Image (cartoon, rainbow, N blue to C red):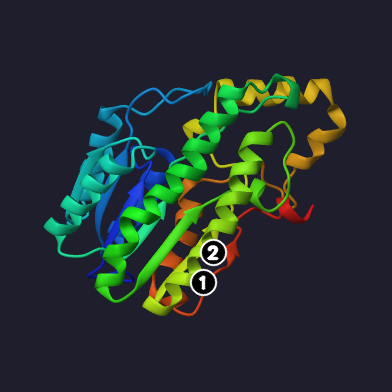
Amino acid sequence: MGNRVAGKVALVTGAARGQGRADALRLAEEGADVIVVDVCAPLPSVAYDSATPADLAETVSLIEKTGRRVIDGIADIRDLDALRGIVDDAAGQLGRLDIVVANAGICVPKPWDKISPQIFADTISTNVTGTWNTVMVSAPHLVRAGGGSIILISSAAGIKVQPFMVPYTTSKFAVRGMAKAFAAELGRHNIRVNSVHPTGVSTPMGSGGMQAEIMAAIEGDQRLGVMFMNMMPVDITQPEDVADTVLFLASDESKFVTAHELAPDAGVTEF
């Protein structure tokens, strides 16, 4: 444990498990108090299991073991008012907000002609509108704190197109652009905004039914399967690997880094 974000307060969405949990725990290990939010309910359109209240409770327990304060809340990031209520209350209890990790999102892989209007709408409302909501309810707290860091979790699919993921790719390119647009306007408040673009990560989102969907889609057009290949000799990364990038962007080590995309992607976007 260290102190790279000591004395700061962080918000992490989608924190009940997987990438969000790893980010929240890493920040706590480095001295931050943490607000953790998750929907803890069935996610729309997805083929993988959704997080539960028990998952969020486990995240809280792990953070408490670091000795840091933690406040949890259950909300759908698409619900602006519910999300604002949780963030305002938690930031009031903890005294401030300095770091925002907009991690929550969904992915529904299918060939283009198997995507329904509902799948497209669910993906955009969660990944784009939900991310916008997260920034909108948290940025005023960072302004009052005199600055901070906002980190939007995008994907390798937000830098290089990935096949069989039209809605997801669309949403993650949007998140990348959103980070740059917010960075331009929030810079005068000493708020930095950046996006993170991982390759495949070993989380519940990337397991089970989702992998089956991708493999079935590749069978229909095997030429495109190579687009998922990492340049480095790794098939998949771990949530902790991405959390290291998140910590860097949250810390003062990146104090002049804004409007950028950082890609712990094993080279997949260059291959």
Query: Label for residue 45?
Result: none
Using the image as rendered, state which of residue 254 and residue 91 is in the foreground: 91
Instruction: Name which residue type carries label 1.
Output: Ala
**Around disc 1, counting alpha carbons within 10 Å, would you say few (fewer than 14), some (14 to 19), or many (20 or more)?**
some
According to the image, label 2 marks what residue?
Answer: 181
Q: Dots 2 and 1: beta carbons under 8 Å?
A: yes
Residue bearing mark 1: 184
> Residue 88: percent from the left, percent from the top?
20, 53
Determine the residue positioned at 14% across, 58% down. 92
Q: Is residue 42 left or right of residue 37?
A: right
Q: Inspect the image, locate mark 2, and give the three-letter code of the amino acid beneath it.
A: Ala
Q: Quadrant of residue 111?
A: top right
Q: In the figure, 260 relative to 89: above or below?
A: below
Mark 2 secondary-structure assignment: helix
- Up the image or down, 222 lies above or below 67; here it is above
Question: In this view of the protein, which residue sits in the foreground, 33 or 266?
Answer: 33
The outermost residue toward the right is 223
Q: Is 167 positioned to the left or the right of 129 in the image? A: right
- Residue 128 coordinates in the image, percent (x, y): 51, 44
Query: Could you say where residue 207 lies in the image, as x and y percent from the top left?
Result: 54, 28
In percent of width and height, residue 228 lies at 73, 40
